[in-house]
Image (spheres, grey):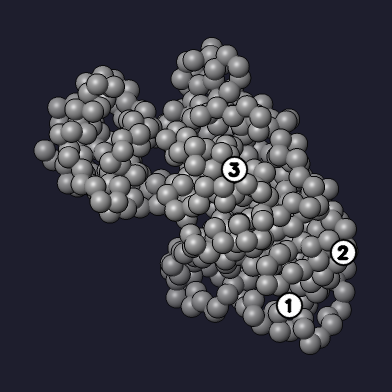
Amino acid sequence: MLVHELIYAGSKQSKAFLGQREISYAQLQEMVEKYRNYFYHKGMRAGDHVGLLAKNSPEYVYSYMAVASLGAVVVPLNFQLVVREIAYIVQDAKMKHLITMAPLELAPELEHYHYPERVTQLIISDIGAAVAVREYAAAPPVEIAPENICVIIYTSGTTGKPKGAMLSHKNLVSNAGALTEILPMTPEDRVLCVLPMYHCFSWTCAVLATLLAGAAVRVVETFVLKETMAVITGERLTVVYGVPPMYNLFTTYGSPGGFGHVKYFISGGASLPENVARQFTQKFGRQIIEGYGLSEASPVVTLNPVATPKYRSIGKPLPGVAVRVTGEDGAEVPPGIVGELTVRGPSVMKGYYNLPEATRQTLEGDWLHTGDLAYRDREGYFYIVDRLKDMIISSAENIYPREIEELLFAHPAIVEAAVVGFPDPLRGHAACAYIVAAEGQNIDKKAIRDYLQTKLAAYKIPREFVQVAALPKTVTGKVLNTVLREQAAEEFGGR
């Protein structure tokens, strides 16, 4: 099956999208066909790379599916990027077309890269108006193989320039299918899509897996706490995909018993602190099902079993996906030993676009090197320890920031915490903890240090503690450790 063929999985009369604009599967199919014909009329052809810059909406889905059905390649863009950042991806991906919410002044930035291609901008409101008043000639059928590239997803670029992970139709559909084996859904299910569709987590899980099940998507443009909770409860949604900060807010402001109709709460995008998971379960009587993935794997790799989830675990591999923990020699290590998490399976990317060396370093044979440090227990559950690049080596000792962060999260005066390393002339590197205090609390740094000293070896105790109003994050809830590392290095690195 191809990605755009998923729109035919539901019965024509069933709802594909819920909300103020309820849209049936028949209407979805009709709109994708209209967009397809319009795009072909505008010169879009098989093999073209097409940017998609938009917020969550049915039109996002129409556009994506229409582009894919033409044999073109979708390049989703984060709508929070500035023009300079967008221009970099436009030229790096060699785009010919850009579907966007409003015209962008790209020419000056593209001149900087000496990009010769003319980029046709297609404005979403104009597309809707055009297809509403005119029937465009039918675009011819295109032969597309499951192994053909469907999408190029650019990584966040927290280390250097962003890289484009090439995912095929097979990658995406196989991942959606494996996910629904662990999280069975029926056409009666109602699935929240509030995480941004440009992100692989939201697209594969909240959109593709839902369409594959013939269920309905409730599209929410952006996360606003009260509005999102009102949608979940008022419209009796049954599946919620979220990130840890969302569940933290639900626990703080939600009403006990208000989520009784939800079958699955799934968390991804960042590590779920045990304290958040426990408090959520205590308040709502529901478990959060934590999973793990990365764009290079379409993205889901592991997920906790619904019946037997484990706190702090990312669960077990999806059906058809092989996961192992390897040492520096590349050999698999025994349970309980920390090493790099590597992944093999039908959802692993084809490689990075136009980056053969980066592809070679990341894909070793069929195995994808994730760059995450992990271990597995004797029951086959996996646990992320930290990002390989986030590990702090201080006086020749390895310090895993997440171990410290979990303890800080458990402190009643702390809502959020992030630990990063910075250069230290004595120890090579030292740790700095950035802390967000609970409402009405003020952090006593000595008390926090004393608290950690009862639970950690002395070398793991952060040298510095900084109270902040909020942690810098991506839209999917990942803390921007690069930003914090730069801040710590600038403030404390010379001491």
Q: Secondary structure at mark 2?
A: loop
> Which quarter of the rendering shows the C terminus?
top left
Left or right, 463 with reference to 231: left
Instruction: Decide which of tag 3 and tag 1 comes sooner along the chain.
Output: 1
Pick the front one: 436 or 236: 236
Q: Earlier in the sequence, mark 1 or mark 2?
A: 2
- The amino acid type of the residue labelled 1 equals Lys
- Label 3 environment density (alpha carbons within 10 Å; few <14, some 14–19, many ≥20): many
Residue, disc 2: 13
Q: Residue at x 42, y 35 (%)?
A: 275
Helix, strand or loop at mark 3 = strand
Give the CA distance from mark 2 to mark 3. 28 Å
- Say which of 205 and 227 sits in front: 227
Residue 266: numbered disc: 3
Indicate whether 402 appears above or below 256. Answer: above
* Residue positioned 48% across, 59% down in the render: 225
Please state if 274 lies on the left or on the right of 126 as rendered.
Answer: left
Alpha-carbon span between mark 3 and mark 1: 40 Å
- Mark 1 burial class by Cα count in 10 Å: few <14, some 14-19, many 20+: few
